[in-house]
């Protein structure tokens, strides 16, 4: 059970990192398109370009991201226990 959960968290972490990288590439494309439409947008697109570069460079280790997701999920374990206890009491 824990092995499957670990594999699932690793997959989710990889998906999050990939999605962030792809979103960064999209921001860079958006900035380039806006600059081609009107060079006056250069002041606005510099911030978008900076964010895109940072998002493309985002590459934490899968262990770090998996640990972060796991610690977030563990916060909900007591709530799940209370819900199961209430369900048990009703039945």
Image (spheres, helix red, strand yellow):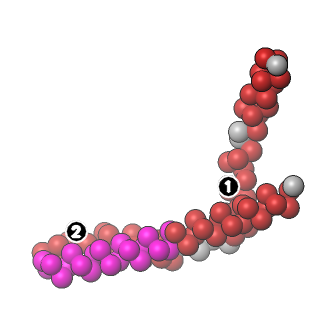
Name which quarter of the figure residue 35 lies in.
Answer: bottom left
Q: Taking 43 as reference, is 76 above or below it?
A: above
- Majority secondary structure of magenta residues: helix
Residue found at the far front of this picture: 91
> Residue 7, which numbered label?
none
Question: Which residue is denoted by mark 1 in the rendering?
Answer: 69
Which residue is rendered at x = 55% and y = 72% of the image? Answer: 18
The span shown in magenta is: 20-39
**Front disc: 1 or 2:** 1
Question: Which residue is denoted by mark 2 in the rendering?
Answer: 44
Residue at disc 1, secondary structure: helix
Among the two numbered marks 1 and 2 on one chain, the one whose residue lies closer to the N terminus: 2
Q: Position of residue 9 (x, y in %)?
A: 72, 61
Discs 1, 2 touching: Cβ within 8 Å: no
User: Could you tell whether 20 is left or right of 67 in the image?
Assistant: left
Pick the front one: 53 or 19 = 19
User: Could you tell whether 21 is left or right of 44 in the image?
Assistant: right
Which residue is rendered at x = 77% and y = 65% of the image? Answer: 7
Magenta highlight on residue 12: no
Pick the front one: 44 or 26 = 26
């Amino acid at each position: 059970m824990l092995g499957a959960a670990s594999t699932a968290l690793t997959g989710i972490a990889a998906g999050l990192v990939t999605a962030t990288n792809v979103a960064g590439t999209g921001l860079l494309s958006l900035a380039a398109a806006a600059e081609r439409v009107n060079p006056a947008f250069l002041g606005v697109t510099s911030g978008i370009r900076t964010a895109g570069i940072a998002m493309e460079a985002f590459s934490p280790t899968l262990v770090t991201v998996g640990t972060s997701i796991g610690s977030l999920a563990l916060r909900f374990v007591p709530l799940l226990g209370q819900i199961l206890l209430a369900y048990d009491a009703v039945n």
